[in-house]
Image (tube, helix red, strand yellow):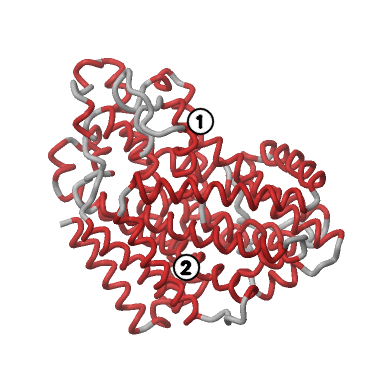
């Protein structure tokens, strides 16, 4: 039933976009304006609350509870674990925005900061840290921790609705209420992942247009999506252990290589200075940035950036959370939270310092026109920057390969998770179900590109995330109730056999 309802909703959306892309774009923009104008405060409050909540769990008395049996060991090594969660959680977006976001903030900073100044450069990188740091990984941690706890500690199936048993009871979770929760999770996941697939197609096209005579046009992007769809479906069919794990490890290796080469070939000491001062500014202003709106000044900066990102991360949360839970069996709550929250955030800080810092250095001290190039075509930001470095063509080619592999790992991980969500929580969903979701999420990416390009991709994420944000708030209460029950009645609450959920 969950599979059928979800597929019908997605098919209806795809059909609407195919028949009337302008009508779809108009309705999406209307919903976007309503969501950001009326519920922007809600996105800011709940995202900050998720960060506080997950840190509380890590350092509370619950931090020693293991996600599995009391003596169970982690299923994957730390390196493989980090590689898989990072590839699924950030991937394409980090490569897309690594240069584009700091340069865009430098040219168009938030209210109260003059553009093209040292202050706007500092603000640009600080907000890049903010948007890609602790907050998104706190959102992922909430879902991932709840799913891992109920699945591996309490022996339940890997459905998001199962995390509501302490609040709703067995009967309601097995009925319509549970089905609605799982459908909402699937819809949020489909649109969140489609946003990333669209971004990936845009940037692969941007990279190829810099390296070859291929034009930067919609038909090329659709062709890219079709070609990569075949690749990630093949990877998804090979399963978690072979396809996704191997590609994730390869992703991490290529990302580390291009990061190191850019650091060595770029202004290395400037980058280290920038990383240090920006990290200090980020930590100092964390609370103020977390709750910042502009009710008196108006303006669309917060809506276009912070609210888009928070909604995008929430839309990604069912997918990334379920995937992280799947690969995190055997870790303690404290180990899970600190690993998921801190390690990817630190990598993101380094990534933006290297690529964003290199671009800012070229723009401010070299006057190489990076900001103007980004203004003309945001998808070319990374490639324009790399071209000004020694071995620029090689770096640009490596970057294109990285985007392609991130595209594949994000999509096949999402296909795997959507299959789990729509097949009763099976840890190894049927191939036919994965095939259907692989084709549908690519179809949505195509529809969104045709109906609004980058703006259409952003709109879909923000609108689809709102109902699931309410689901996430309820999950926090349900998880705390379950943890308290285990502390009070450990023998009654825990299942005798933890192998049931494997």
| SS at circle 2 | helix
Residue 279, x across and y down, in percent: 70, 39
Going by the image, does 141 lie left or right of 383? left
Identify the residue shown where x is 75% and y is 72%. Answer: 372
- Res 397 → quadrant: bottom right
Residue 161, x across and y down, in percent: 25, 43
Mark 1 surroundings within 10 Å by alpha-carbon count, few (fewer than 14), some (14 through 19), many (20 or more): some
Taking 55 as reference, is 310 above or below it?
below
| The N terminus: image quadrant | bottom left
User: Does the residue at mark 1 contact the one at mark 2 (Cβ under 8 Å)?
Assistant: no
Taking 277 as reference, is 221 above or below it?
below
Identify the residue shown where x is 57% and y is 62%. Answer: 304
Identify the residue shown where x is 37% and y is 38%. Answer: 327
| SS at circle 1 | helix
Pointer 2 residue? 198
Q: How many marks?
A: 2
Residue 266, x across and y down, in percent: 78, 53
Identify the residue shown where x is 36% and y is 83%. Answer: 20
Pointer 1 residue? 338
| The C terminus: image quadrant | top left
Mark 2 surroundings within 10 Å by alpha-carbon count, few (fewer than 14), some (14 through 19), many (20 or more): many
Q: CA distance from mark 1 to mark 2?
A: 31 Å
Q: Nearer the viewer, residue 226 or 128?
A: 226
């Amino acid at each position: 039933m969950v599979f059928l309802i979800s597929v019908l909703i997605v098919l209806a959306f795809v059909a609407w976009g195919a028949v009337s892309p302008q009508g779809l774009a108009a309705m999406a923009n209307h919903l976007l304006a309503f969501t950001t104008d009326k519920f922007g405060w809600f996105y800011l409050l709940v995202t900050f609350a998720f960060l506080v909540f997950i840190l509380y769990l890590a350092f509370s008395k619950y931090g020693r509870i293991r996600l599995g049996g009391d003596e169970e060991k982690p299923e994957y090594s730390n390196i493989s674990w980090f590689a898989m969660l990072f590839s699924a959680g950030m991937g394409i977006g980090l490569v897309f925005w690594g240069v584009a976001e700091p340069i865009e903030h430098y040219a168009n900073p938030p209210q109260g900061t003059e553009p093209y100044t040292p202050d706007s450069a500092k603000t640009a990188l600080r907000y890049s840290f903010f948007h890609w740091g602790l907050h998104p990984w706190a959102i992922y941690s909430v879902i991932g921790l709840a799913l891992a706890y109920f699945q591996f500690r309490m022996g339940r199936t890997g459905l998001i609705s199962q995390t509501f048993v302490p609040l709703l009871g067995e009967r309601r979770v097995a009925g319509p209420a549970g089905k609605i929760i799982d459908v909402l999770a699937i819809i949020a996941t489909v649109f969140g992942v489609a946003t990333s697939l669209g971004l990936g197609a845009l940037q692969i096209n941007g990279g190829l247009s810099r390296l070859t005579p291929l034009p930067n046009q919609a038909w090329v992007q659709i062709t890219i999506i079709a070609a990569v769809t075949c690749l990630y479906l093949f990877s998804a069919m090979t399963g978690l252990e072979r396809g996704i794990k191997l590609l994730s490890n390869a992703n991490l290796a290529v990302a580390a290589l291009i990061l190191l080469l850019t650091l060595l070939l770029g202004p290395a000491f400037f980058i280290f200075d920038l990383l240090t001062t920006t990290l200090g500014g980020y930590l100092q202003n964390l609370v103020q940035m977390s709750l910042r709106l502009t009710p008196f000044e108006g303006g669309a900066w917060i809506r276009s950036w912070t609210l888009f990102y928070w909604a995008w991360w929430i839309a990604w949360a069912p997918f990334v959370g379920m995937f992280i839970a799947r690969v995190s069996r055997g870790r303690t709550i404290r180990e899970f939270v600190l690993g998921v929250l801190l390690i990817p955030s630190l990598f993101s800080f380094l990534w933006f310092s290297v690529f964003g810092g290199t671009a800012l250095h070229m723009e401010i001290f070299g006057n190489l026109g990076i900001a103007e190039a980004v203004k003309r075509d945001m998808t070319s930001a990374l490639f324009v920057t790399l071209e000004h470095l020694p071995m620029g063509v090689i770096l640009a080619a490596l970057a294109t390969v990285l985007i392609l592999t991130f595209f594949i790992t994000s999509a096949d991980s999402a296909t795997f998770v959507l299959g789990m969500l729509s097949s009763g929580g099976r840890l190894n969903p049927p191939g036919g179900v994965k095939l259907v979701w692989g084709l549908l999420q690519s179809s949505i990416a195509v529809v969104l590109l045709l109906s609004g390009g980058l703006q259409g991709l952003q709109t879909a994420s923000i609108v689809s995330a709102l109902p699931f944000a309410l689901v996430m708030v309820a999950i926090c209460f349900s998880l705390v109730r379950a943890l308290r029950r285990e502390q009070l009645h450990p023998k009654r609450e825990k299942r005798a056999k933890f192998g049931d959920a494997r």
